[in-house]
Image (cartoon, rainbow, N blue to C red):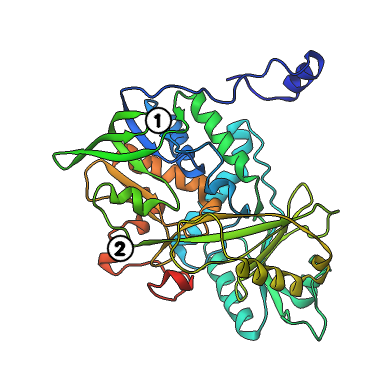
Amino acid sequence: MSRYSALALLRGALTGQKHWDRAWRDPEPKASYDVIVIGGGGHGLSTAYYLAKVHGIRNVAVLEKGWIGGGNTGRNTTIVRSNYRQPALHNFFDFALGLWEGMSDELNFNVMFSPRGAMFLGHSDSDMTSLAQRGDALRCAGIDAELLTRAQVQKLVPLLDMSPAARFPIYGGMIQRRGGTARHDAVAWGYARAADALGVDVIQNCEVTGLTIAGGRVAGVETTRGAIGAGRVGICVAGNSGPVAALAGIKLPIEAQTLQAFVTEPVKPMIDTVIMSQSLHCYISQSDKGGIVLGGDPDQFPSYAQRGLPNRLEKAAAEAIALVPALSRLRMVRCWSGTTDMSFDGSPIISTLPVDGLYLNGGWCYGGFKATPGSGFAYAQLLATGAPHPLAAPFGLDRFARGATVDEAGVGPMPQLR
Protein backbone atom coordinates (compact mmCIF):
# COMPACT_ATOMS: atom_id res chain seq x y z
CA MET A 1 0.00 0.00 0.00
CA SER A 2 1.48 3.33 -1.02
CA ARG A 3 1.05 6.04 1.60
CA TYR A 4 -1.12 9.06 1.00
CA SER A 5 0.82 12.29 1.57
CA ALA A 6 1.15 15.87 0.39
CA LEU A 7 4.12 14.79 -1.71
CA ALA A 8 2.03 12.04 -3.33
CA LEU A 9 -0.71 14.58 -4.14
CA LEU A 10 1.87 16.92 -5.70
CA ARG A 11 3.32 14.08 -7.71
CA GLY A 12 -0.16 13.15 -8.92
CA ALA A 13 -0.91 16.74 -9.90
CA LEU A 14 2.21 16.78 -12.09
CA THR A 15 1.60 13.36 -13.67
CA GLY A 16 -2.12 13.35 -14.38
CA GLN A 17 -3.17 11.48 -11.20
CA LYS A 18 -2.34 8.14 -12.87
CA HIS A 19 -0.14 6.59 -10.19
CA TRP A 20 -2.73 5.77 -7.53
CA ASP A 21 -3.09 2.12 -6.52
CA ARG A 22 -6.42 0.45 -5.81
CA ALA A 23 -7.48 1.27 -2.24
CA TRP A 24 -7.92 -2.46 -1.58
CA ARG A 25 -7.63 -5.68 -3.60
CA ASP A 26 -10.56 -7.65 -5.03
CA PRO A 27 -9.49 -11.20 -4.08
CA GLU A 28 -11.27 -14.49 -4.73
CA PRO A 29 -12.25 -16.29 -1.51
CA LYS A 30 -9.72 -18.86 -0.24
CA ALA A 31 -10.78 -22.37 0.76
CA SER A 32 -10.52 -21.45 4.45
CA TYR A 33 -9.48 -18.73 6.88
CA ASP A 34 -8.51 -18.56 10.52
CA VAL A 35 -11.28 -16.01 11.06
CA ILE A 36 -14.23 -14.96 8.92
CA VAL A 37 -16.02 -11.73 9.78
CA ILE A 38 -19.52 -11.59 8.29
CA GLY A 39 -20.30 -7.97 7.44
CA GLY A 40 -18.14 -5.37 5.72
CA GLY A 41 -19.43 -2.31 7.54
CA GLY A 42 -17.29 -0.13 9.77
CA HIS A 43 -17.50 -2.55 12.71
CA GLY A 44 -16.59 -5.61 10.64
CA LEU A 45 -13.71 -3.90 8.87
CA SER A 46 -12.30 -2.38 12.05
CA THR A 47 -12.49 -5.83 13.66
CA ALA A 48 -10.45 -7.32 10.84
CA TYR A 49 -7.96 -4.45 11.00
CA TYR A 50 -7.35 -4.88 14.74
CA LEU A 51 -7.21 -8.69 14.40
CA ALA A 52 -4.32 -8.23 11.99
CA LYS A 53 -2.62 -5.28 13.64
CA VAL A 54 -2.99 -6.02 17.36
CA HIS A 55 -3.25 -9.82 17.42
CA GLY A 56 -1.20 -10.74 14.33
CA ILE A 57 -4.03 -12.83 12.83
CA ARG A 58 -3.87 -12.02 9.12
CA ASN A 59 -5.54 -15.04 7.52
CA VAL A 60 -8.83 -13.20 7.83
CA ALA A 61 -11.72 -12.58 5.41
CA VAL A 62 -14.41 -9.95 5.63
CA LEU A 63 -17.51 -11.03 3.69
CA GLU A 64 -19.81 -8.24 2.54
CA LYS A 65 -23.05 -9.05 0.71
CA GLY A 66 -23.05 -5.69 -1.08
CA TRP A 67 -20.30 -3.13 -1.46
CA ILE A 68 -18.09 -1.44 1.12
CA GLY A 69 -19.83 1.64 2.50
CA GLY A 70 -23.24 0.68 1.11
CA GLY A 71 -24.79 -0.54 4.36
CA ASN A 72 -25.44 1.09 7.71
CA THR A 73 -21.98 2.67 7.79
CA GLY A 74 -23.12 5.06 5.09
CA ARG A 75 -26.66 5.40 6.47
CA ASN A 76 -26.36 7.42 9.67
CA THR A 77 -25.92 11.03 10.79
CA THR A 78 -22.15 10.75 11.48
CA ILE A 79 -22.30 11.87 15.12
CA VAL A 80 -19.41 10.86 17.42
CA ARG A 81 -19.63 11.31 21.21
CA SER A 82 -19.23 9.44 24.49
CA ASN A 83 -21.54 11.37 26.84
CA TYR A 84 -23.68 8.50 28.14
CA ARG A 85 -24.67 8.34 31.78
CA GLN A 86 -24.23 4.61 32.45
CA PRO A 87 -20.57 3.86 33.38
CA ALA A 88 -20.45 0.74 31.20
CA LEU A 89 -21.51 2.84 28.20
CA HIS A 90 -19.55 6.05 28.74
CA ASN A 91 -16.36 4.13 29.51
CA PHE A 92 -16.70 2.07 26.34
CA PHE A 93 -17.66 4.98 24.07
CA ASP A 94 -14.93 7.20 25.50
CA PHE A 95 -12.38 4.52 24.68
CA ALA A 96 -13.79 4.61 21.14
CA LEU A 97 -13.63 8.43 21.09
CA GLY A 98 -9.93 8.22 21.93
CA LEU A 99 -9.43 6.01 18.88
CA TRP A 100 -11.43 8.42 16.71
CA GLU A 101 -9.03 11.23 17.66
CA GLY A 102 -6.07 9.45 16.10
CA MET A 103 -7.85 7.48 13.39
CA SER A 104 -6.88 9.51 10.31
CA ASP A 105 -3.17 9.31 11.19
CA GLU A 106 -3.37 5.63 12.12
CA LEU A 107 -5.17 4.59 8.92
CA ASN A 108 -3.35 7.11 6.69
CA PHE A 109 -6.82 8.02 5.45
CA ASN A 110 -8.71 11.23 6.15
CA VAL A 111 -11.94 10.23 7.89
CA MET A 112 -12.73 13.93 8.41
CA PHE A 113 -13.18 13.60 12.17
CA SER A 114 -14.37 17.04 13.30
CA PRO A 115 -14.49 17.57 17.11
CA ARG A 116 -16.90 20.50 16.88
CA GLY A 117 -18.77 19.65 20.09
CA ALA A 118 -21.91 17.61 20.75
CA MET A 119 -24.58 19.49 22.72
CA PHE A 120 -27.78 18.22 24.35
CA LEU A 121 -30.51 20.82 24.82
CA GLY A 122 -32.55 21.06 28.02
CA HIS A 123 -36.21 22.08 27.57
CA SER A 124 -37.36 22.04 31.19
CA ASP A 125 -36.13 22.01 34.79
CA SER A 126 -36.41 18.24 34.66
CA ASP A 127 -34.22 18.09 31.54
CA MET A 128 -31.58 20.31 33.16
CA THR A 129 -31.54 18.16 36.30
CA SER A 130 -31.05 15.06 34.15
CA LEU A 131 -28.25 16.74 32.18
CA ALA A 132 -26.55 17.89 35.38
CA GLN A 133 -26.66 14.36 36.79
CA ARG A 134 -25.26 12.96 33.55
CA GLY A 135 -22.50 15.58 33.51
CA ASP A 136 -21.54 14.75 37.11
CA ALA A 137 -21.32 11.04 36.23
CA LEU A 138 -19.12 11.82 33.24
CA ARG A 139 -16.75 14.14 35.10
CA CYS A 140 -16.38 11.59 37.91
CA ALA A 141 -15.10 9.20 35.22
CA GLY A 142 -12.70 11.83 33.87
CA ILE A 143 -14.81 12.45 30.74
CA ASP A 144 -15.41 16.03 29.63
CA ALA A 145 -18.88 17.45 30.08
CA GLU A 146 -19.90 21.08 30.53
CA LEU A 147 -23.30 22.29 31.68
CA LEU A 148 -24.37 25.40 29.76
CA THR A 149 -26.69 28.20 30.76
CA ARG A 150 -29.37 29.47 28.42
CA ALA A 151 -27.16 32.44 27.51
CA GLN A 152 -24.20 30.18 26.74
CA VAL A 153 -26.35 28.01 24.46
CA GLN A 154 -27.62 31.11 22.65
CA LYS A 155 -24.07 32.37 22.13
CA LEU A 156 -22.97 28.98 20.80
CA VAL A 157 -25.91 28.62 18.36
CA PRO A 158 -27.42 32.07 17.71
CA LEU A 159 -29.98 30.68 15.26
CA LEU A 160 -31.84 28.67 17.92
CA ASP A 161 -35.30 30.00 18.71
CA MET A 162 -34.85 31.44 22.21
CA SER A 163 -37.89 33.68 22.04
CA PRO A 164 -40.66 33.62 24.71
CA ALA A 165 -43.00 32.10 22.12
CA ALA A 166 -40.65 29.26 21.20
CA ARG A 167 -42.48 25.96 20.71
CA PHE A 168 -39.73 24.13 22.62
CA PRO A 169 -38.27 26.51 25.22
CA ILE A 170 -34.54 26.12 25.88
CA TYR A 171 -33.41 26.28 29.49
CA GLY A 172 -29.75 25.41 28.86
CA GLY A 173 -27.69 22.48 27.67
CA MET A 174 -24.74 20.18 28.16
CA ILE A 175 -21.86 19.95 25.72
CA GLN A 176 -19.05 17.49 25.20
CA ARG A 177 -16.53 19.56 23.27
CA ARG A 178 -14.49 16.51 22.16
CA GLY A 179 -17.56 15.13 20.38
CA GLY A 180 -18.45 15.96 16.79
CA THR A 181 -18.79 14.22 13.45
CA ALA A 182 -16.80 12.13 10.97
CA ARG A 183 -17.29 11.24 7.31
CA HIS A 184 -19.16 7.91 7.61
CA ASP A 185 -18.26 6.12 4.38
CA ALA A 186 -14.64 7.31 4.61
CA VAL A 187 -14.41 5.35 7.86
CA ALA A 188 -15.32 2.14 6.04
CA TRP A 189 -12.96 2.92 3.18
CA GLY A 190 -10.10 3.76 5.53
CA TYR A 191 -10.45 0.55 7.54
CA ALA A 192 -10.86 -1.53 4.35
CA ARG A 193 -7.67 -0.09 2.90
CA ALA A 194 -5.68 -0.49 6.12
CA ALA A 195 -6.91 -4.05 6.72
CA ASP A 196 -6.14 -5.02 3.15
CA ALA A 197 -2.60 -3.71 3.54
CA LEU A 198 -2.17 -6.09 6.48
CA GLY A 199 -3.26 -9.09 4.38
CA VAL A 200 -6.99 -9.23 5.16
CA ASP A 201 -9.18 -10.32 2.23
CA VAL A 202 -12.07 -7.88 1.81
CA ILE A 203 -14.59 -9.77 -0.34
CA GLN A 204 -17.57 -7.82 -1.67
CA ASN A 205 -20.77 -9.16 -3.25
CA CYS A 206 -20.49 -12.33 -1.18
CA GLU A 207 -23.62 -13.03 0.85
CA VAL A 208 -23.56 -15.63 3.61
CA THR A 209 -26.46 -18.03 3.15
CA GLY A 210 -25.62 -20.65 5.77
CA LEU A 211 -23.34 -21.59 8.64
CA THR A 212 -21.51 -24.92 8.64
CA ILE A 213 -21.64 -26.47 12.11
CA ALA A 214 -20.05 -29.81 12.99
CA GLY A 215 -19.97 -31.36 16.44
CA GLY A 216 -21.38 -28.25 18.05
CA ARG A 217 -18.66 -26.05 16.59
CA VAL A 218 -18.71 -23.69 13.62
CA ALA A 219 -16.57 -24.91 10.74
CA GLY A 220 -17.27 -22.34 8.03
CA VAL A 221 -19.91 -20.54 6.02
CA GLU A 222 -21.98 -21.14 2.90
CA THR A 223 -22.00 -18.16 0.57
CA THR A 224 -23.23 -17.08 -2.84
CA ARG A 225 -19.61 -17.65 -3.94
CA GLY A 226 -19.30 -21.14 -2.48
CA ALA A 227 -18.40 -22.76 0.83
CA ILE A 228 -15.55 -21.27 2.88
CA GLY A 229 -13.99 -22.94 5.90
CA ALA A 230 -13.16 -21.02 9.08
CA GLY A 231 -11.76 -21.62 12.53
CA ARG A 232 -13.87 -18.85 13.99
CA VAL A 233 -16.77 -16.83 12.61
CA GLY A 234 -17.80 -13.39 13.82
CA ILE A 235 -21.27 -12.06 13.00
CA CYS A 236 -21.10 -8.28 12.54
CA VAL A 237 -24.12 -7.35 10.43
CA ALA A 238 -25.95 -4.48 12.09
CA GLY A 239 -29.60 -4.61 11.12
CA ASN A 240 -29.48 -8.28 10.15
CA SER A 241 -28.05 -9.90 13.28
CA GLY A 242 -31.26 -11.83 13.91
CA PRO A 243 -31.50 -13.53 10.49
CA VAL A 244 -27.78 -14.44 10.42
CA ALA A 245 -27.81 -15.83 13.97
CA ALA A 246 -30.93 -17.79 13.02
CA LEU A 247 -28.79 -19.70 10.49
CA ALA A 248 -27.29 -21.36 13.58
CA GLY A 249 -30.69 -21.80 15.23
CA ILE A 250 -30.09 -18.92 17.67
CA LYS A 251 -32.84 -16.41 18.55
CA LEU A 252 -31.47 -13.06 19.72
CA PRO A 253 -33.08 -10.39 21.95
CA ILE A 254 -32.94 -7.95 19.02
CA GLU A 255 -35.57 -6.35 16.78
CA ALA A 256 -34.83 -4.57 13.50
CA GLN A 257 -36.31 -1.10 12.95
CA THR A 258 -35.92 1.49 10.20
CA LEU A 259 -34.18 4.77 11.03
CA GLN A 260 -34.22 7.71 8.63
CA ALA A 261 -32.14 10.82 8.14
CA PHE A 262 -32.05 13.55 5.54
CA VAL A 263 -29.92 16.44 4.34
CA THR A 264 -30.71 19.87 2.91
CA GLU A 265 -29.10 21.76 0.08
CA PRO A 266 -25.64 23.13 1.01
CA VAL A 267 -25.50 26.58 2.58
CA LYS A 268 -22.87 28.78 4.18
CA PRO A 269 -21.76 27.79 7.71
CA MET A 270 -24.69 28.37 10.08
CA ILE A 271 -24.40 25.63 12.75
CA ASP A 272 -20.92 24.78 13.95
CA THR A 273 -21.75 22.22 16.62
CA VAL A 274 -23.95 19.12 16.86
CA ILE A 275 -27.36 19.93 18.36
CA MET A 276 -29.33 17.13 20.01
CA SER A 277 -32.54 17.01 22.01
CA GLN A 278 -33.32 13.80 23.84
CA SER A 279 -36.75 15.08 24.84
CA LEU A 280 -37.61 15.46 21.16
CA HIS A 281 -35.14 12.88 19.86
CA CYS A 282 -34.05 15.33 17.19
CA TYR A 283 -30.46 15.97 16.09
CA ILE A 284 -29.01 18.58 13.75
CA SER A 285 -25.53 19.21 12.36
CA GLN A 286 -23.95 20.77 9.29
CA SER A 287 -21.80 18.66 7.01
CA ASP A 288 -18.45 19.80 5.66
CA LYS A 289 -20.16 20.29 2.28
CA GLY A 290 -22.68 22.66 3.86
CA GLY A 291 -25.82 20.52 3.97
CA ILE A 292 -27.81 20.44 7.21
CA VAL A 293 -28.07 16.81 8.36
CA LEU A 294 -31.22 15.97 10.34
CA GLY A 295 -32.52 12.89 12.08
CA GLY A 296 -35.20 11.76 14.49
CA ASP A 297 -37.00 8.69 15.79
CA PRO A 298 -36.98 5.25 14.13
CA ASP A 299 -40.25 3.92 12.74
CA GLN A 300 -40.79 2.02 16.04
CA PHE A 301 -42.11 -1.24 14.62
CA PRO A 302 -40.07 -4.22 13.40
CA SER A 303 -38.96 -3.92 9.78
CA TYR A 304 -36.03 -4.75 7.52
CA ALA A 305 -36.99 -2.11 4.96
CA GLN A 306 -34.44 0.51 3.96
CA ARG A 307 -37.20 2.99 3.26
CA GLY A 308 -39.01 4.64 6.15
CA LEU A 309 -42.37 6.32 6.66
CA PRO A 310 -42.92 9.93 5.49
CA ASN A 311 -44.53 10.93 8.79
CA ARG A 312 -41.23 10.32 10.61
CA LEU A 313 -39.44 12.69 8.26
CA GLU A 314 -42.23 15.24 8.69
CA LYS A 315 -41.96 15.02 12.49
CA ALA A 316 -38.16 15.38 12.46
CA ALA A 317 -38.35 18.35 10.06
CA ALA A 318 -41.05 20.06 12.15
CA GLU A 319 -39.02 19.70 15.34
CA ALA A 320 -35.80 20.90 13.69
CA ILE A 321 -37.56 23.96 12.24
CA ALA A 322 -39.11 24.72 15.61
CA LEU A 323 -35.63 24.72 17.16
CA VAL A 324 -33.91 26.54 14.27
CA PRO A 325 -36.56 28.48 12.30
CA ALA A 326 -34.04 29.43 9.56
CA LEU A 327 -34.09 25.80 8.40
CA SER A 328 -37.59 26.39 6.97
CA ARG A 329 -35.98 28.24 4.07
CA LEU A 330 -33.92 25.25 2.94
CA ARG A 331 -34.82 22.48 0.51
CA MET A 332 -34.31 18.83 1.35
CA VAL A 333 -32.18 17.19 -1.33
CA ARG A 334 -32.18 13.57 -0.23
CA CYS A 335 -33.05 11.17 2.56
CA TRP A 336 -31.86 7.69 3.45
CA SER A 337 -32.72 4.90 5.83
CA GLY A 338 -30.79 2.25 7.69
CA THR A 339 -31.88 -0.90 9.51
CA THR A 340 -31.04 -0.73 13.18
CA ASP A 341 -30.45 -3.61 15.60
CA MET A 342 -32.64 -2.62 18.56
CA SER A 343 -31.59 -4.68 21.56
CA PHE A 344 -34.02 -5.14 24.43
CA ASP A 345 -32.04 -2.96 26.85
CA GLY A 346 -30.74 -0.45 24.32
CA SER A 347 -27.10 -1.56 24.68
CA PRO A 348 -24.84 -3.54 22.34
CA ILE A 349 -24.04 -7.23 22.44
CA ILE A 350 -20.37 -8.23 22.03
CA SER A 351 -20.38 -11.86 22.97
CA THR A 352 -19.76 -15.53 22.42
CA LEU A 353 -22.78 -17.54 21.21
CA PRO A 354 -24.03 -21.01 22.19
CA VAL A 355 -22.14 -22.52 19.19
CA ASP A 356 -18.38 -22.88 19.78
CA GLY A 357 -16.32 -20.59 17.58
CA LEU A 358 -19.31 -18.37 16.72
CA TYR A 359 -19.44 -14.78 18.02
CA LEU A 360 -21.76 -11.79 17.80
CA ASN A 361 -21.25 -8.04 17.57
CA GLY A 362 -24.67 -6.37 17.22
CA GLY A 363 -27.58 -4.69 18.95
CA TRP A 364 -26.16 -1.17 18.64
CA CYS A 365 -29.58 0.43 18.26
CA TYR A 366 -28.97 3.84 16.63
CA GLY A 367 -25.59 4.44 18.33
CA GLY A 368 -23.33 2.14 16.38
CA PHE A 369 -21.41 4.61 14.24
CA LYS A 370 -19.76 6.40 17.14
CA ALA A 371 -18.59 3.06 18.54
CA THR A 372 -16.92 1.88 15.32
CA PRO A 373 -13.23 1.82 16.38
CA GLY A 374 -13.88 0.70 19.96
CA SER A 375 -16.28 -1.97 18.79
CA GLY A 376 -13.73 -3.36 16.34
CA PHE A 377 -10.94 -3.26 18.91
CA ALA A 378 -12.96 -5.11 21.55
CA TYR A 379 -14.50 -7.62 19.13
CA ALA A 380 -11.07 -8.44 17.71
CA GLN A 381 -9.87 -9.28 21.21
CA LEU A 382 -12.86 -11.57 21.77
CA LEU A 383 -12.31 -13.34 18.44
CA ALA A 384 -8.57 -13.67 18.99
CA THR A 385 -8.55 -14.81 22.62
CA GLY A 386 -12.06 -16.03 23.41
CA ALA A 387 -12.13 -13.64 26.38
CA PRO A 388 -13.95 -10.27 26.32
CA HIS A 389 -12.14 -6.96 26.48
CA PRO A 390 -12.72 -5.53 30.00
CA LEU A 391 -14.69 -2.60 28.57
CA ALA A 392 -16.93 -4.99 26.61
CA ALA A 393 -17.48 -7.44 29.48
CA PRO A 394 -20.84 -5.85 30.52
CA PHE A 395 -22.22 -6.45 27.01
CA GLY A 396 -22.30 -10.26 26.94
CA LEU A 397 -25.44 -12.02 25.72
CA ASP A 398 -25.79 -13.75 29.09
CA ARG A 399 -26.69 -10.46 30.79
CA PHE A 400 -30.31 -10.95 29.74
CA ALA A 401 -30.43 -14.28 31.60
CA ARG A 402 -28.59 -12.84 34.63
CA GLY A 403 -30.76 -9.74 34.88
CA ALA A 404 -27.69 -7.53 34.46
CA THR A 405 -28.95 -5.37 31.61
CA VAL A 406 -27.39 -1.97 30.82
CA ASP A 407 -30.41 0.29 30.38
CA GLU A 408 -29.39 3.91 29.58
CA ALA A 409 -32.94 5.04 28.80
CA GLY A 410 -34.47 3.22 31.79
CA VAL A 411 -37.51 2.08 29.82
CA GLY A 412 -37.15 -1.66 30.33
CA PRO A 413 -37.16 -4.37 27.67
CA MET A 414 -39.12 -2.39 25.07
CA PRO A 415 -37.10 -1.60 21.91
CA GLN A 416 -39.93 0.49 20.45
CA LEU A 417 -39.50 3.03 23.27
CA ARG A 418 -35.80 3.72 22.68
**Residue pointed to by mark 1:** 61
Task: Examine the rendered structure and indicate whether residue 14 appears above or below residue 235.
Answer: above
Q: Is 285 positioned to the left or the right of 367 in the image?
A: right
Quick one: 56 or 335, which is closer to the camera?
A: 335
Q: Position of residue 231 (x, y in %)?
A: 27, 32
Q: Please report the residue visible at 53 percent of the width from the left and 54 percent of the height from the top.
A: 306
Quarter of the image with the N terminus is: top right
SS at mark 2? helix
Q: Position of residue 72 (x, y in %)?
A: 53, 49
For the residue marked with disc 2, what is the amino acid?
Arg
Q: Which residue occupies the extreme left position in the image?
A: 215
SS at mark 1? strand
Task: Examine the rendered structure and indicate whether residue 307 appears above or below residue 402.
Answer: above
Task: Examine the rendered structure and indicate whether residue 201 appears above or below residue 378.
Answer: above
Q: Is 186 positioned to the left or the right of 365 in the image?
A: right
**Residue pointed to by mark 2:** 399
Q: Are marks 2 and 1 in contact (CB under 8 Å)?
A: no
Q: Please report the residue visible at 35 percent of the width from the left and 51 percent of the height from the top.
A: 243
Residue 262 in view:
yes
Q: Position of residue 283 (x, y in %)?
A: 66, 64
For the residue marked with disc 1, what is the amino acid?
Ala
Quick one: 7 or 40, which is closer to the camera?
A: 40
Q: Residue 302 occupies which quadrant of the picture?
A: bottom left
